[in-house]
Amino acid sequence: MLVLSRKLDESLIIDGRIEIVVTGISGNKVSLGIMAPGNVSVYRKELCMISDEQAPKRRSRSHAKPSCWRTLGKVQSMKNTLR
């Protein structure tokens, strides 16, 4: 794990195409802005963990997509329904 220190409005670049910017700091809470190409999915870890815990156990998960991807599909489907 790489650990970096960043101040307000400072950023870091991942793979030359993903930028993470510190947009706010309040007490022990840090707000981040993430700029990434449309084909890059960004998830909050706690949502993936909840989704994994609720997902039924399968015999072989080697070919299964992470449950975060399934959750994203549901969210995108809901967005399309609301349009």
Image: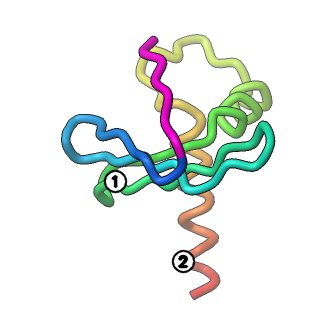
Colour pattern: rainbow
Residue with the mark numbered 2: 80
**Compared to 1, does 79 lie above or below?**
below
Q: Secondary structure at mark 1?
A: loop
Mark 2 surroundings: few (<14), some (14-19) or many (≥20) residues within 10 A: few
Secondary structure that dominates the magenta span: loop
**Compared to 76, does 79 lie above or below?**
below
Q: Is residue 67 left or right of residue 34?
A: right
Estimate the spatial distance between the alpha carbons at disc 1 and disc 2, rounded to whole Å. Answer: 21 Å
Quadrant holding the N terminus:
top left
Residue 57 part of the magenta segment: no
Residue at left 55%, top 56%?
Answer: 23
Q: Amino acid at mark 1?
A: Ala
Span shown in magenta = 1-7
Residue at left 63%, top 33%?
Answer: 45
Residues 8 and 23: in front is: 8
The x, y position of residue 44, in whole percent, is 62, 41
Residue with the mark numbered 1: 36
The x, y position of residue 36, in whole percent, is 34, 54
Tag of residue 13: none
Residues 82 and 30: in front is: 30
Quadrant holding the C terminus:
bottom right
